[in-house]
Amino acid sequence: MKLDIISRVKEPNLKREKIEIKAFFKGEPIPSKQSIIDHLLANDSSLIKEQLLVRKVETHFGQSTLLSTLYYYVSLDALKQTEQDYIKTRNKIKDNEKPNNIQQNTIDEDNKKTNDIQQNTIDEDNKKTNDIQQTTKTIANISTK
């Protein structure tokens, strides 16, 4: 596959750069988004893979060329804040921070509740055992008198 960069436009307000490419793939299947990213990275080594996102791929029937729009973000945080969820999902970009923290907090809370319940049960059982032992001693004292 041959790849030509048509244009590069900086979008400083969105902390990204819009890259438009034209790819030629005569005799090959239509390239995947990952393949497009890999070829672009081979052409421009200054780009970082995690900060690159394929937004659009256009092919035309019977032609072995495609037009694609990619966005290169200044940082991964800028990408996560700017892009819509379905685009992040489609490009396999994970936003792990919130779900993991929520999940971990839920697990910690559940463990604490379980430990509290177990401790209360143990305390109640110990109290009942002490009451039974005290009652047994009292009965034994009364019987011996």
Image (tube, helix red, strand yellow):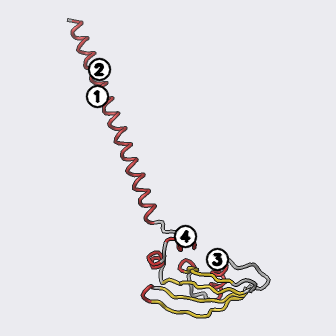
> Which type of secondary structure does the marked residue at label 4 adopt?
helix
Mark pair 1, 2: CA separation = 9 Å
Structural distance between the alpha carbons of marks 1 and 3? 66 Å
CA gap between label 3 and label 4 equals 14 Å
Report whether 39 appears left or right of 111. Answer: right
Label 3 vs label 4, nearer the camera: 4
Ranked by sequence position, the earlier of labels 1 and 2 is: 1
Residue at mark 2: 132
Whether the residues at callouts 3 and 4 have beta carbons within 8 Å, the answer is: no
Q: Which residue is mark 1?
A: 127
Residue beneath the point at 32% across and 36% down: 120
Q: Position of residue 13 (x, y in %)?
A: 42, 87
Question: Quadrant where the N terminus lies?
Answer: bottom right
Give the labeled residue for mark 3: 34
What's the CA distance linking mark 1 and mark 4? 55 Å
Label 3, label 2: how many angstroms apart (C-alpha)?
72 Å
Tell me what residue is drawn at x 42 percent, y 52 percent: 107
Element under disc 2: helix
